[in-house]
Amino acid sequence: MKKVIAAVLILSFAQIIHAQKGFKTLFDGKTTKGWHTYGKDSALAGWNVEDRLLHFNPDAAKDGQGGDLVTNAEFENFHLKLEWKISPNGNSGIIFYVNEDPQKYPNTFSTGLEMQVLDNDGHPDGKITKHRAGNLYDLIESKSEPVKPVGEWNKAEVISNKGKLTLILNGVVVVETTLWDENFKKLIAGSKFADWAGFGTFKKGKIALQDHGNNVWYRNIEIKQL
């Protein structure tokens, strides 16, 4: 009994310390509460919770049950932390500053910026510069590639504060840039998004996890507003 009480006290202390850091859980490990499929009222069947993991299952996404998963809430200045695991040959993404207006913007990536989630060796995008895991998709190539082998968990962080963006993968800073300045506008002009009205312009928006048609798992999703 003493050991059980000690374990509970240690856990409670850890939770208190974590809360003091200002991070809020975005995924409770049990439900998709706080999330919904882009343009829908709730999370469709392609996204399910199993073993405290948020799993996109393409088999369950048939018959119109797929789509990117987005937060109900919007965020402006924030520090996002999560872990991801991709399937062999898989592709997904962590998309942020999403403006959810399906009539005007049909996809999350119509407006949102993306930190790439990818099997670099197995997916065709791995052969494209600026499309590899950890990159700011199609805009900035990562400084290094600390991504772990397929099937292993990767820790990703997105820190955006007053225009300063930092992407971290497995504890290594892989991208640093300033959003919305003239240089950033040039990056967009030189990308596939050059003619996409609204892309990369919103300074507040939702966070999305991408359905790219492949199995992908996410866990320990939390955010701190800065």
Image (cartoon, helix red, strand yellow):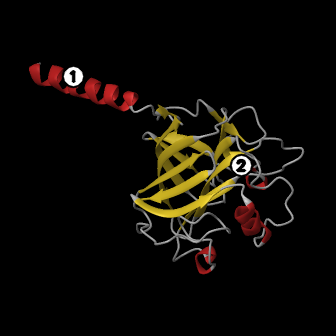
Which mark, residue 67?
A: 2
Q: Nearer the viewer, residue 196 or 43?
A: 196
Tell me the quarter of the picture where residue 205 sits.
top right
Does residue 60 sit above or below 92 in this rendering? above
Which secondary structure lies at badge 2?
loop
Residue 170 visible at all: no
Point out residue 188 in the picture as x, y percentages from the top left corner. Answer: 75, 65
Does residue 125 sit above or below 30 in this rendering? below
Q: Looking at the rendering, in which quadrant would you find the C terminus? A: top right
Mark 1 = which residue?
A: 9
Q: Nearer the viewer, residue 171 or 67?
A: 171
Residue 176 visible at all: yes
Point out residue 201 in the picture as x, y percentages from the top left corner. Answer: 77, 51
| Residue type of the residue flagged with mark 2 | Gly
Which residue of the protein is positioned furthest toward the left in this rendering?
Answer: 2
Please tell me which residue is depicted at 52% across the width and 39% down the height of the picture: 49
| Residue type of the residue flagged with mark 1 | Leu
Relative placement, left or right, of 170 versus 99 is left
